[in-house]
Image: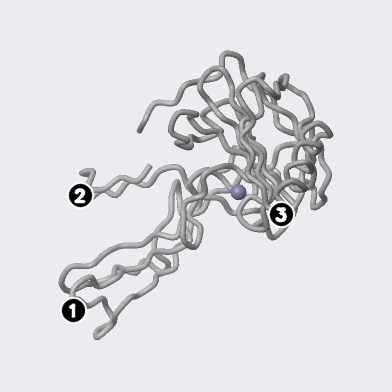
Amino acid sequence: MAQAPSFKTVPLAPMDIPLLPSGNFMELRSDHFHSGVDLKTNGVEGVPVRAVADGHVSRIRVGPWGYGLALYIDHPEGLTTVYGHLRAFAPEIAEQVLEAQYSAQNQTVDLTPTAGSMPVKAGEVIAWSGNTGGSSAPHLHYEVRRTRDQHAFDPEALGLTLADSRPPVIRGLRIYPSAPHSRCQPYPGTAKGFATDERSGGFGLQHGVVPAVFGPVGFAVHAVDFYDGTSNTCGVRKIDVLIDEKPHFKST
Ligand SMILES: [Zn+2]
């Protein structure tokens, strides 16, 4: 995996409320991997959002889709933090946006203030959380990118602390015949799902089922992870497939 620069000092929390994720980094979405962490805002909008470290506003976006109202802050370490689905920007930023909207005669704007023209201090309130853009419930989408190529990194690996004492859960296994002649029991089955249950130190197929297959098949595993204090399902960090104890496939 590409190396991320790191913050000089541990970044502050982006909000003062307990940080409970409703989505984590790289979890599967219907057509993409999630590139940040979704932080719950107690079901309401208007929670103050703070810059996690010193830097300057590098991009301000307002649009009906995607991150809705979004703010990008570049930090001297070569990192950019992104704050999405906001309800409102801090007054100085809001002023710039309003001016740009008037001059463009358009609500949708995408501004890139010159480096240093809009400095922010760590802990400064830069916006208020909301539910704008492609968001179905109030939350803050928080993202950390490498500035030079906008490559996203796991915020949890870059100073975002989330309580997570609960191990992941495997909910099911599905076997997909991957060639026209492939079959999965019971024949002439095609894709077949198997429920799992928890047993000492892990999960297995319910009722001790041992599936039989014919021809090449693929496996899909339904695995989720939970953080402390929230029932939202999140993605797992890593999946290893072993065949007879030997590593065969790995997804991180
Ligand atoms: Zn998100």
Residue named by callout 3: 106
Q: Is residue 73 left or right of residue 105?
A: left
Q: Is residue 41 left or right of residue 63?
A: right
- The circle on residue 210 is none
Task: Say which residue appears at 51% left-offset and 29% top-offset.
Answer: 157
Image spot of residue 20 (x, y percent): 69, 42
Disc 3 to disc 1, C-alpha distance = 53 Å
Amino acid on which disc 3 is placed: Asn
Q: Residue 10 or 85: which is nearer the viewer?
A: 85
Classify the position of the N terminus by image quarter.
top left
- The circle on residue 180 is 1
Amino acid on which disc 2 is placed: Asp
Q: Secondary structure at mark 2?
A: loop
- The circle on residue 244 is 2
Classed neighbour count for the residue bearing mark 2: other residues with Cα under 10 Å, few (<14), some (14–19), many (≥20): few
Outermost residue, top side: 8
Disc 2 to disc 3, C-alpha distance = 61 Å
For the residue with label 1, is its CB less than 8 Å from the closest atom of ligand 1? no
Classed neighbour count for the residue bearing mark 1: other residues with Cα under 10 Å, few (<14), some (14–19), many (≥20): few
Classify the position of the C terminus by image quarter.
top left
Image spot of residue 165 (x, y percent): 59, 37
Q: Earlier in the sequence, mark 2 or mark 1?
A: 1
User: On screen, 226 above or below 160?
Assistant: below
Image spot of residue 32 (x, y percent): 46, 55
Disc 2 to disc 1, C-alpha distance = 26 Å
Q: Are marks 2 and 1 in contact (CB under 8 Å)?
A: no
Outermost residue, front side: 103
Image spot of residue 180 (x, y percent): 18, 79
